[in-house]
Amino acid sequence: MSLMNKSLWQRLSEPKDLQSMSPLKKIFTYSILFVWSFVVLFPLYWLFVTSFKLPIQVSDGPFYIPFIDFEPSLHAWKYIFIDLGQDTLRPYLNSIIIASISTVLAVFIGSMSAYALTRIEYKPKLGSIVGFIGIVALVVYLTVTVGMQWQLSLSIGVALFVVFVLAFSRYFTRALGNNDILFWIISQRIMPPVVSVLPIYIMFQQLGLLDTHFALIVTYMAVNLPIVVWLMRDFFAKIPVDLEESAMLDGASRMRVFLTIYLPLAKPGLAATTMLVLILSWNEYLLALFLSTADAQTMPLMVAAQNATRGPQWWYMSVLIVVMVVPVLIAAGFIGRLINKGQLAGAVKG
Amino acid sequence: MSIKLTGIRKSYGSTEVVKGVDLEIAEGQFLVLLGPSGCGKTTLLRIVAGLESATQGEVYIQGQEVTNVLPKYRDIAMVFQSYALYPHMSVMQNIGYPLLLRKVPKEERDEAVLKAAQAVHLEPYLQRYPKQLSGGQRQRVALARAMVRRPKLFLMDEPLSNLDAQLRSQMRAELKHLQKKLAVTTVYVTHDQIEAMTLADKVAVINQGVVQQLAPPREIYNDPANLFVAGFVGSPRMNFIRGAIKQGIFSSRSCEFLCPKMADQSAAVLGVRPEDISIVAGEGQIRAAIYSIELTGDETIVTCSIDDEQTSAQIVVRMPADFESQIGEVVSVKITSKRVYLFDAQSQLRLRADGEGEVL
């Protein structure tokens, strides 16, 4: 491709060797990099410094450098870790348990459905789907309005659906495809979460599962599944079909193909997706606010709780946030190592 | 391991790509499916493998119907055009993968892998990864992976088409040697007639989803069943002259040929291979003008234009390397062999006199 044919964006995003640049360009490039690094790193620094300040030092104006500008103090750290003690540790552990388990589940289940949607063609009949929705509505109506016992109405619904599909399915010609299913999956994220948070709350309240790890794990998993499916589908689609067919002829089952061919080859994508989902669950606030009160409280709630009646306690918040950042950094370090290129080189042709 | 296909049809939507194929391959035979791209040969192979399901018809492997059996239960090994090596596994793991899936113990597995690797001269590369190998070496890994578990049936989908010409002929010889040594029934798909002629025990020439002829390579070449087979096999391809047969004489504007045993035919095609005709000084059957002369080294390929029912028809003559002439010179071409074929221009089928092969 000649230089003329490249768009501005292509030319800007091309890798350039810093060594071979003219001094002026070099200075320009480094100054942009410096400014951007500052923008990214300064909040972290400010957070760290604030965690060692006394309330009076926070409110009296900007002090930047410990030991010179101000005398650092451990009072906030002492309060969070010794005075609060268990009350800090519990949300911290909750966060770790809920974020990690929901991430693992979401990534595993999501990758499986992403694989299925890339490699298997589904043709759900439009008529059956409409029938299903109709019967769900009927069951809800029977239970809520008529006051039938849910066990009974559910059995009626299942029976009706089976009869309905057996009787009419051969008249249904319009069918949906994989892309429709994918759109339906992502459509779960189109609606703002605030809209669904109340129904979810009532659901768990009815089940008596409020303020449990289970509720948060299941909800986070469900919320993150669409993201996993959409990201992983793209990575799986890049893997040549020949590999799968070859493995199947070699004697592998679909599950085996998924576990020994697809997952290892999509490792970079898997790592990136895991990281993203982990961070989303780790920082999630709204759902946690509704679904947990004490036992299953997570760190974001704990941080928010420092903005109490006495006004925002910046020093305590800073300590908590510093502590919250650490596991994410560790995870990023581990997972980042898996993100390397060139996984697919040598699979097919030269 | 014998294979039988009966009445195989395959449609994608409204387009039918395989239109009723019956084939039979005896144990240990090397069958080549030969045809132009898009003729349905790969689809047919994938139906045998179980990667694609036939719309109609049955597949039998050793007398057992396997039409709806999953590929993993068919005990078939396949070499893909793309090789389909697992990029995250070393050569050793690649070759051992089919055995790993069959839960073969490690020592036994390593031994089998080593043996298969030796057969294709890959021992020095066992610890490498596919991306560190050349095209020919990848091809060998794919072959070794197919051989390692001693399958009942080899399927090969244009396995040599990604190699350069020299490597291709070398691998062709190795392939033939290995297949004879292992005596495994093989189905091989290619569009390359040289591969088909050199490798096959039997060739099935396929066009537009139909088997045009199923016969040993020699017979395909010497006794083509119809115009398509005659034109597809052979390089340079067979010359065709359009004309008519009347009272035992095939005649067109520039050609007259005696065929006393043949019945009258208003639209016929005469076919003769470039090596069976010659430009002569005396009387010939075809009048032509020289169009181009190409010296290949050991021979000269002469293209001549002739008058035909079609305008601007051409015939190709293979002449000795010392042949010399001028472009535009009018020459007479003589048919020097008994291998002359007549076809019905409408049905494209071979015309035979009283069921006999030769028309002279």
Image (spheres, coloured by chain):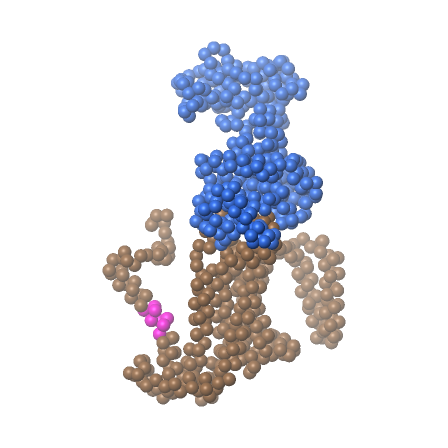
Which residue reaches farthest top?
A: B282
For the colour brown, the matching chain is A
**Can you see residue B291?**
no
Q: Is residue B106 above or below residue B259?
A: below
| Residue A124 pos. (x, y %) | 64, 57
- Residue at 42% over, 25% down: B296
Q: Is residue A114 above or below residue B183?
A: below
- Left or right: residue A317 compared with residue B22: left
What span is in magenta? A35-42
Q: Is residue B324 above or below residue B5?
A: above
| Residue A272 pos. (x, y %) | 47, 63
**Can you see residue B238?**
yes
- Residue at 68% over, 63% down: A132
- Decide which of B202, A123 is in the foreground and name it: B202
Quarter of image, res A59: bottom left
- Decide which of B129, A347 is in the foreground and name it: B129
Chain B's colour is blue
Q: Main secondary structure of the magenta part?
A: helix
| Residue A35 pos. (x, y %) | 32, 69
- Decide which of B4, B128 is in the foreground and name it: B128
| Residue B322 pos. (x, y %) | 40, 18
Q: Is residue B297 above or below residue A294?
A: above
* Residue B73 is one of the magenta-drawn residues: no
